Amino acid sequence: MNKPSDFAITDANEAAASVAYRLSENIAIYPITPSTPMAELSDEWSQAGKKNLWGDIPTVVQMQSEGGVAGALHGALTAGTLATSFTASQGLLLMIPNMYKIAGELTPFVLHVTARSLATHALSIFGDHSDVMACRQTGFAMLCSNSVQESADFAAIAHAATLESRVPFLHFFDGFRTSHEINTYEPVSNEVLDQLIDDDAVKAFHDRGLTPDAPMIRGTAQNPDVFFQAREAANGYYDALPAIVDRIMAKFGELTGRRYQLFEYSGPEDATDVVIVMGSGVETCQQAAEALCADGRKVGVLAVRLFRPWSLQHFIDALPKTIERIAVLDRTKEPGALGEPLYQDVVTALREAKDLGKMASEPTVLAGRYGLGSKEFNPGMAKAVFDNLLGSESINHFTVGIVDDVTHRSLPVDEDFKVASGDEFSAVFIGLGSDGTVGANKNTIKIIGEETDNCAQAYFVYDSKKSGAMTVSHLRFGPKMIKAPYLVQSAKFVGIHQWQFVTKYDVLKYAAEGATVLMNSPFPPEKIWSKLPFEVQQTLIEKKLELYTIDAYAVARKAGMGGRTNTIMQTCFFAISGILPKDEAIAKIKGAIEKTYMRKGPAIVEKNFAAVDMALSSLYLVDLPATANSSIAFPPAVAAEAPDFVQRVTGVMLQGDGDLLPVSAFPVDGTWPCATSQWEKRNIATEIPVWDPDVCIQCGKCALVCPHATIRCKHYPENALDEAPENFLSAPFKDRKITGHRYTIQVAPEDCTGCGLCVTACPAKNKANPREKAINMRPHQETVAQEKMRWDFFQELPRPERTALGLTTRDTQLREPLFEFSGACAGCGETPYLKLLTQLFGDRLMIANATGCSSIYGGNLPTTPYCTDENGRGPAWSNSLFEDNAEFTMGMRLAVDKKTEMARRLLQQLTPQLGDMLVREILMSHQKDEMSVFAQRDRVAELKRKLIGMDEPAAKRLLTFADFLVRKSVWGVGGDGWAYDIGFGGLDHVLASGRNVNILVLDTEVYSNTGGQASKSTPMGAVAKFAAGGKETPKKDLGLIAMGYQNVYVAKIAMGASERQVIQALDEAESFDGPSLVIAYSHCIAHGYNLNFGLQQQKLAVDSGHWPLYRHDPRRIERGDPALQLDSKAAKKSLQEYVDNEVRFRSLAQVNPGRSKELINRAESIDGDQRRLYENLAQVNKPKDDIGEPI
Amino acid sequence: MNLTTHYLGLELPHPFILGASPLASNLDRVRKAEDAGAAAITLHSLFEEQGLRQEAGLDAHVHAYEESFAEAGSYFPKEAEFHLGPDEYLAHVSAAKKAVNVPIIASLNGTHLGGWSYFAKEIEKAGADALELNLYYQPRVSDETADNVETRLEEIVKSVCESVKMPVSVKLSPFFTSLAHFARRLEEAGAKGLVLFNRFYQPDIDIEDLELKPKLKLSNSSELLLRLRWLAVLSGRYQLDLACTGGVHKRDDAIKAVMCGADVVQVVSELLTDGVERLSDLRCEMSRWMEDKEYESLAQMKGSMSYRHAPNPEVIERGNYMRILQSWEPADSID
């Protein structure tokens, strides 16, 4: 198919949302990956005043959860307005109750879904059909689109069909593979929509809306006498639906030339073997089938478009009459079922067709699963499915795309099978998130796809880290529409934008024979060969690759571009790929630069132009020798001393070869070992901090703020340094009680992200050169070797006794952090709190973690950052869902309490055998401090020794629970999206329960993980997604709500304002025998400023009155004091001073200064009112008992 | 009293204008300045360097996080950063022009040749009546000769003046080796006026925290003398209009500046301290004084004490400098 004359280049999210928006009057939204962009775009369009088909601007409202969205939609529909929404995965599940209602009431409505995995043994943000398949019983029609083009087309067809049929539609396409694939497509114009939508049906819908002017009632309760009949009354609407969709598809075909069918067969009419499939896999199977047909096979593909209601007649009509064998591919898994849903429907349909005499033959039907969690599905895998139909030993209920060496259900795949790509040009680019590679590639697509006759396709793969993430861009260009929904396997061009990847990974695996390779290398062209690993050299020679190199780092530095090498590498791509004439390409790049930057001044434009010109003059073709001779090999992914599991599994994943791991490699229940992040040496920092013992005052602030626990402190006896390597740094330990000890602060040089927060936090300055502090950033390359040696020795040094440590900043930092080297952003404001939590209570900590940033850096594989102490104890961590985390935490508390209760009862029961003294001591221990907990552990150890020798069943049972006689610290952790919005109902209930549950809210005042959408914590006057015009309502006062319960410990903390108060609050919350809520100010990349200044900005937040510090401790009431004590003074700086530093506020001030000023003034006034309220509360004493007048 | 004066081709009812400062940084303040009777309003400067830094900051702290994580391609609404940068300033010029009837003089501080003329054109498009080029520039320690500095500044002025039709004045620092000669070069380059002088904001030192502290010290009348000297020297020498800025706090300061040849006096520090309403007081006080002294008009007084007209011009010259130094005796306690 050729490029259409009227075309756009975008992803399916935008293509579908463009139609949905224009056909809606009300839109309710909530962010969830991968559907979030549809909601964001709708909000942006509404803000910009974009009109729908009827000339109105759709109203877009953000709700607190998908459940809330569904309720709001149901209301908007019931009252008669056209409504839509977008969702995926768990979000879709939250809508199910309302989906039954909406369908049961025959309400026209379309829900657009980016099909995504459901969290089971693990969360996956990626694509499969497990969410939509969980909705097939709701009464919604289900229409599946397979590509960017179809996502727009089927959105239109769904909206038209729902109005005519009255049956609501779930329109879905594959999460990420389709939702995020950028492709050339023909948009659906307003003219087409106008002709497609039946005005009478729209009027009828509007007229059916409830109104007191002609009142009716819906939502009645029905009794056994009538419910059943009434439920059957709508049957006719479902019976009529396939014909309606068929008719609308035909009309759409007339209007656009794009013709679709409910079941669409492609292949020879006399095919014997057919694969039935739904979603992006269709095009992949079609490509494989075409290749097989060219080899003489008779194979075809049946695409299922309308999955519900299933039209038997259309299905049978679409199948070739010669069919003998069918393979049904499901992109979901239903454990325990006879087969997955599509398979079951096909089997049922064939059986019914036979019974009804509609089909003579009885084809064999095999079922298979593919592509779960966006597992790659390529033509080679599709071929394996066709081949499986032929073999005498066909596997039924097979899997394809993985190696199942446990139940042996996976199909072998011919790795060498490739389909012809014709005139297509394919390219793969490997870069770092921060270097702008993806952005440059999007720009390249615009240049090639919009300004030439070529079509363009792009798909981007990211790793799971939030700092130093690797990005792989897969681009295709060609004169025809590109239908290849799978990764590029044999690229004609491979761009490696970071040298570190050349030496670590087999990046040339993407290159086709004779391909052009471009490497960004810090070495001159004549030296690069000697710096390449042997494997890379060999591949270059074997595949006859052409190698170009540029030192883009140097060019960027020279051109004043910092670390942004994207424009330079993009220029090189155009210069050597030959995809466009070089001069034309360069002119287009410069044109794009001018368009982007001219408003910001010619200096910026000229800087970029200079970078382009310098790139061309710094690009070299490398003369390759005939044989490989390098002594450099790829380094092992993990150190040799890493545990077996890490070697076998984690290491393979770290190498980027997780796809190769067989089923047997994995835990069966999602339970993974802790403490594996220590084996992943990422070396992503360009600068790392180095300690200066002479300047250091040993305060521990640098370690406290380090988001990745890469700065550690120890004091130890002087003789521990006997074996110290040369140049190991130490200073006399400054302590009034301990003498003869040395002190060291040491960075983990390979784990540091180079954020520099430690340097900013350091209060000590070198008196002779105050630019230097006690910790200073130094180039990584120059220091890593020495620091690594120091780090290795440092780890061997003895730790100070925990029981001797107090709660000063210094002492907390002498405790071992049990959360280290996570994938959080460099400079993250959340992780220092979590790390501190593990330093205080890590050896007895249980964490229930709401989905969000903290669950991603806390538990996204390949590695796990929660670790263990020398006794093997450490935080036990789990993530349930986004919405239920307070309840999940409480469940953990219940389990701990029950186990403790059982242990105490058994202990009492066994008193005669165990001895009165031991039992009494165990039962009486308060365990409110470190000393007491440690003493209890010793007692329990003694108890267990005694129990081991006892035969009574009670003793054996007690042995199971004995460790629960030692206090456990149960914490629910999550962000403001959870605590203020989606999880608030549960949080409120848990706080009201009186149970000893601790809640830590890492408050970034925005949904950080999904990209900065407003939450109810977002401050007034801040710009966020879903609040593009600036949030106009005040930040919710979660703490005050919790204080209302009286018996809840509540604290609001900010590390940058008062470390002491942070430590106190966490300690008090933990020791409080009841619910605790600690709300922690967490600076975030979504605030838009240099996070080096995160702590200063935290202090400004407090000093300006935006973030008052307080502790509300119900225990104080018993002492006759007010429960609330304020830990910060009234505002001493203006709110303006605080907000001026952050893009989230400043952008509004610049777009709409009047509105910004008004909102900030109102916010400041509200802050003042809040302060006065707190001051009053802080003076509320419990009335003293009336003891009468003195005599 | 006829206080009419002409500056940069604008006929102004009196010589008191608002100098470049935060006093006109938002529309409310611009309106207040007009209400207080400012003859013209000079806006704060658009710094091209600020745009460059902002872009570098956005690259490092906003863009660097984009397109690197599957769940979030960005962290701000698309529109959010679009307006950051010079657009804000240009919008302010435009809004200020619409909000008041008095002339609006924009101010610009560029970093490179193309930038100066590009933004000058944009400012003209935005509706400014005139442009003040703020040539505040700190050459790198040893990179540039004095002549190079002057030549480069002259090129900037020339390039801007050729790019726009609106009149352009140049705000200078007093630290030029041959200021009068340089003034002529600027006039030849197309400048219509000079603004004397820019003030340097010199950081203080915090001896506890061992940090340099940026410090804004407001001017006082003692700073006027330097301005008076150079106004007197330049007055009537070229066709350049002259503005006095820095040190005008009282009626007499303004009178002296005009007597030395200033066409207008820019007032800032006085208004920052006592409110923009002081402008009308100054105007009235000057008017009364001139009436008392039976001046006919401001034009009569303008330049009356310049080098060309003052009864004792040698005071401005070096001979007098020597005499003053010699007449200065140390206090008794110092030997």
Image (cartoon, coloured by chain):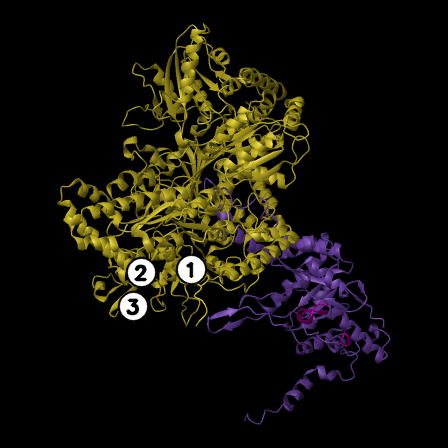
Residue A1104 against residue B173 in the figure, above or below: above
Sequence order check, earlier mark of 1 and 2: 2
Q: Determine which residue is flagged by label 3.
A: A733
- The region drawn magenta spans B258-276
Chain displayed in yellow: A
Residue A814 tag number: 2
Cα–Cα gap, marks 3 and 1? 41 Å
Question: In the rendered image, which quarter is residue A918 located in?
Answer: bottom left
Q: Exactly how many numbered labels are in the figure?
A: 3
For badge 3, the amino acid type reads Phe
Q: Nearer the viewer, mark 2 or mark 3?
A: 2
- Give the image location of residue A464, x and y in percent: 40, 42
- Give the image location of residue A656, x and y in percent: 35, 38
Query: What residue appears at the point 44 percent right and 50 percent down from the top-left corner?
Result: A1002
For badge 1, the amino acid type reads Ile
Residue B92 tag number: none
Sequence order check, earlier mark of 3 and 1: 3
